[in-house]
Amino acid sequence: MTQTRQDDTSEGTSHIVVMGVSGSGKTTIAHGVADRLGWEFAEADDFHPQRNIDKMSAGIPLDDDDRGPWLEDVAAWMAARAADGRSTVVACSALKRSYRDILRDGPPRVGFVHLDGPIAAIGERLSGRTGHFMPASLLQSQVDALEPLDAGEHGIQLDLRQTPDQLIAAAVDWIETAF
């Protein structure tokens, strides 16, 4: 079977999801990785429909029905960039394997950088954060929902207590050797 040019372009791209619970540093690290690699960045929170934002702002955790269409939109965004020959880095919680499966259904070559660490360290970060619709009161619900990467998933786990520069360097090093 002959591949089309679009498929050839898409296959040459890579897509990284910087994942973890709220307050783990996803946005900072994903921005840094995207800047260092010259790849396109997206904040998955920007894809949430207003009803999800309203629900979280009210302190109500999202369920799988809330997250499904949101994750499909993020996957479609990555796939569209892949079709144009562009690699991406997305900051997205991607808490469950089933959520990551949805993201993997978008573009080819998706990998995950999981920022993980003690809940106390994350809670401390959240307590100082302002201007975000995700309240600190929902942290435990995210920790409870989190399914760490398993052996069948392409990814790396990093300790979020490292400095942003250390985390970005470790993520870029993994990407450059794993892709």
Image: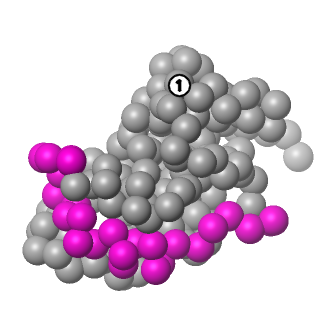
Residue 14 among those drawn in magenta? no
Q: Which residue is mark 1?
A: 165
Residue 52 seen in this snapshot: no
Q: Residue 5's x, y, as percent?
A: 70, 29
* Residue at position x 52%, y 44% in the image: 161
Q: Which residue is at the far right? A: 1
* Residue at position x 41%, y 55% in the image: 121
Residue 138 among those drawn in magenta? yes
Q: Is 48 situated left or right of 178 in this image?
A: left
Task: Provide the residue span drawn in magenta.
Answer: 128-152
Q: Is 121 situated left or right of 111 in this image?
A: left
Q: Does dot 1 land on a helix, a strand or a loop?
A: helix
What main secondary structure does the magenta stretch of the protein show?
loop
Q: Quadrant of residue 100?
A: bottom right
Please tell me whether residue 51 is drawn above or below residue 131 in the rendered image.
below
Q: Is 45 situated left or right of 71 in this image?
A: left
Closer-to-camera residue (150/78): 150
Residue 133 seen in this snapshot: yes
Closer-to-camera residue (77/175): 175
Q: Is 152 situated left or right of 46 in this image?
A: right
Residue type beneath disc 1: Asp
Q: How is the image coloured?
A: one colour
Q: Residue 105's x, y, as percent?
A: 61, 60
Give the number of marks.
Answer: 1
**Would you call the spot at circle 1 few (<14 residues within 10 Å), some (14-19), or many (20 or more)?**
few
* Residue at position x 61%, y 40% in the image: 15
* Residue at position x 74%, y 68% in the image: 150
Q: Quadrant of residue 53?
A: bottom left
Quarter of the picture holding the C terminus: top right
Please tell me whether residue 163 is drawn above or below residue 114 in the rendered image.
above
Q: Residue 158's x, y, as percent?
A: 63, 47
Closer-to-camera residue (110/138): 138
